[in-house]
Amino acid sequence: MGQREKAGTKNFKDLLRKTVNENYGNIFLFEELAKSIGLYDVLKSCYPNDYKEIPALLHYEMDSQAQNYEFHYWYDEHYLNGTKKLYTSEVLALHKNLGIDEKSIELFIKQWLKNLKIKCLTLNSLQKYVI
């Protein structure tokens, strides 16, 4: 690849960065669903430093066919209020820490099941009035 081709590629990439389309709707829907089912509350109590990044990575993995090391590119194209931009090494470190922190995993499972039980009880009590 010659100098001229490299320069043209760089200019094209700069143009793409300036014209990036940020996705809002799917992120807002995901956040509202996560809030309504109590996911953020449970994550915040178990992983106080990473509770915003965990759902963002989850959403990225559902939304994209790309590998985790490309998360920071996806991040630039989406509106993620209050979520830290994670580069490859930070994504790998988060995955590693989540995988080896057995106490937090156990706490998350217990609190999530408790949260689901509360949601089910509330739904069942409302059902009596609807029927």
Image (tube, rainbow, N blue to C red):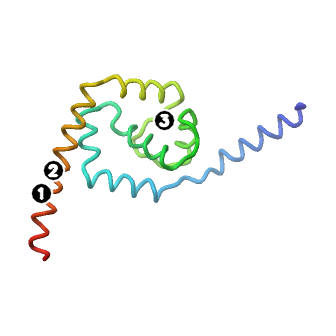
Of callouts 2 and 3, the N-terminal one: 3
The relative height of residue 41 versus residue 104 in the rendered view (above or below) is below
Q: Nearer the viewer, residue 27 or 127?
A: 127
Q: Which residue is mark 1?
A: 121
**Residue at the spot 44% in from the left edge and 24% down from the top edge:** 93
Residue 77 x %, y %: 56, 47
Which residue is disc 2 drawn over? 117
Q: Sort mark 2 into few (<14), some (14-19) or many (20+) by Cα contacts within 10 Å.
A: few
Kind of residue at badge 2: Lys
Q: Can you say which quadrant of the picture contains the C terminus?
A: bottom left
> Which amino acid, mark 3?
Lys
Amino acid marked by disc 1: Leu
Residue at the (59%, 54%) spot, across then down? 21
Tell me if 124 is positioned left or right of 99 in this view: left
Camera-nearest label, 2 or 3: 2
Label 1 vs label 3, nearer the camera: 1
Contact flag, marks 1 and 2 (Cβ < 8 Å): yes
